[in-house]
Image: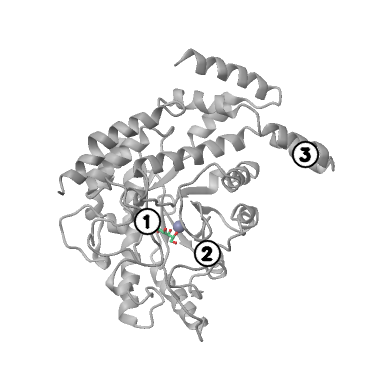
Amino acid sequence: MENQVKQAYEAAKSLYAQHGIDTDEVLKKLAEIKVSVHCWQGDDVKGFLNKDGELTGGISVTGQYPGAATTPAELRADLEQAFSMIPGKHKVNLHAIYADTDEQVELDRIEPKHYENWVKWAKEQGLGLDFNPTCFSHEKSSDGFTLSHPDPEIRKFWIDHCKASRRIGAYFGEQLGQTCVTNVWVPDGFKDNPIDRMTPRKRLKDSLDEVFAEKLDPKYHLDAVESKLFGLGSEAYVVGSHEFYMGYGLQNDTLICLDAGHFHPTEVISNKLSSLALFTSGILLHVSRPMRWDSDHVVIMDDELLEIARELVRHDLLPTTHIGLDFFDGSINRVAAWVVGTRNTIKALLRAMLEPVDALKSAELAKDYTLRLALTEEFKSYPFGAIWDYYCAQQQVPVREQWIAEIKTYEQEVLLQRDKSFV
Ligand code: RNT
Ligand code: ZN
C-alpha cells in the first residue's frame, strides 16, 4: 500500500477515534455488505433472449456509447472489469432475458439449465446472484399488461414466467449457498385515465397469489415486489402502485422493493425505510437516480443517496436490507457507469458508518438540537475520503481516480474492438 494512503488513514483514524468510532471495525463491517449489481447496465436492458426486440414497459435507455455487451461472455467480462474496481464481494442481479443458452426458449419455459453458465461463473468469482422475471420487451406485453392482463391466456403466460423465475432464483440460492432475491416488477398500466382502477389490481393480486403459491426455502430464496408511480405510456395509472404492493408484501410476507425513482419527484425513499422496517422482515432497495422523472441516471453522491445510507446505518437495517442498484445509461462508458454507481453506494454507506450516531441520538433525546445540527454539519467535512482510499487499497482495487485510466485502456482494447467487428 502507498505510504501516503496509509499515513492519511492513520491521521483520519485518530480523529474518528476521538468520537469513539473505530475505523478498523467500520471497514470490517463494510466489507460484509453486498451490493447487488444489476447486469442490465451493461447492454441497455437488451438481454440475449429477444435480441432484436425493443425495450418496452415504460423504461428507456438513451445514448449510443460504443461497446455495449452483445453476448453473455462479453457481459461477464465487463462485469469482471467493473468488479476489479469495486471494493468488496458482491452480487450480480440478472434478468430472465439474460439467459445464456443457444435454445430458443420462451419466457414461460425457462429453466435453471439456461442459467448454468452464470452460476458457474458466479462460483468462480465468489459472487452471489439475484433474479428478476422479465415482464416487458415482449409481444405478450405489447399492450401494456402482463400479470393483470384481462386475457387469461396471456396472464397465464406471465404467471408461468414468474413461477419459472422463482425456481431459477431458488436454484441460484442453493448453488451459491446464499439467499437469492427474485424481484417481480410488472409495467402494467394505462396511458390515460382508466374507468376501472380496481379490477386490474384484483387480477394482479390473484396472479401474484398463483406465482407465490409454491413455497421455497427462505434460506436460499426470497421474493420481492416492486411498485412504481408511472412510466412512459402508463402516466395515468400503474396497477402495481406503492399502496398495492405495500399491502401485498405485508399480507404475504414478501420483501417490498423501494426504487428511488418510483415516487413523486419530491418524495424520497429514505424517509420510508424507518416506517416500512417496523412492519416487514426485510426490504429490497433499487438504488437509482431519478432526474425529473424515473430516468435511472447513474447513482452519484447526492443528498438522497447519503440519507438512504444513514437510515440503514442509524436504525441497524443493514442485516435485513438487500441493496440492489437500478440505473442504465448508454451515453457513457457502461463499465464506468457501474463503477461510479457502485463505488458511490458503498462510499455512502461508509460515510454513514463514520458518523457519531450515538452522540447525535443522545443530543436529540436531550433536546440539544444545537449540538445535533452543529455536529452533523462538522462531520460533513471529516476525512472520510482517507478511510475510503485505505479501504480501496486494502481491498486491492484502484485508489481514487486511478481506475479511470484502466477503464480507458479496457475501452480501447476490448469495448471499441467489439463495434469494429460489426462493420
Ligand atoms: C422499472 C423498474 C425495474 C427495472 C428493471 C430493469 O421501472 O425499476 O426494476 O428497472 O427490472
Ligand atoms: Zn427498479
In this picture, is 384 found above or below 320? above
Q: Is mark 3 within 8 Å of ligand 2?
A: no
Between circles 2 and 3, the one closer to the viewer is: 3
Between circles 3 and 1, the one closer to the viewer is: 1
Q: Residue furthest top?
A: 3
Q: Residues within 10 Å of mark 2 (few under 14, many from 20)?
A: many
The residue pinned by badge 2 equals: 249
Residue in the picture at 48% in, 35% down: 32
Between the C-alphas of marks 3 and 1, the distance is 43 Å
> Residue 396: percent from the left, percent from the top?
40, 25
Disc 2, SS: helix
Q: Which mark is residue 27?
A: none
Q: Dividing the image into 4 quarters, which one contains the N terminus?
A: top left
Of the two numbered discs 3 and 1 on the same chain, state the one appearing first in sequence: 1
Q: Residues within 10 Å of mark 1 (few under 14, many from 20)?
A: few
Of the two numbered discs 2 and 3 on the same chain, state the one appearing first in sequence: 2
Marks 2/1 in contact by CB < 8 Å: the verdict is no
The residue pinned by badge 3 equals: 372
Disc 3, SS: helix
Relative side of 48 to 389, left or right:
left
Between the C-alphas of marks 2 and 3, the distance is 35 Å
Q: Residue furthest right?
A: 367
Residue in the picture at 33% in, 73% down: 141
Q: Residues within 10 Å of mark 3 (few under 14, many from 20)?
A: some
In this picture, is 350 found above or below 24? below
Q: Is 70 in front, or is 27?
A: 70
Between circles 2 and 1, the one closer to the viewer is: 1
Hey, what amino acid is under mark 1? Thr
Q: Is mark 2 within 8 Å of ligand 2?
A: no
Q: Which mark is residue 62?
A: 1
Relative side of 211 to 52, left or right:
right
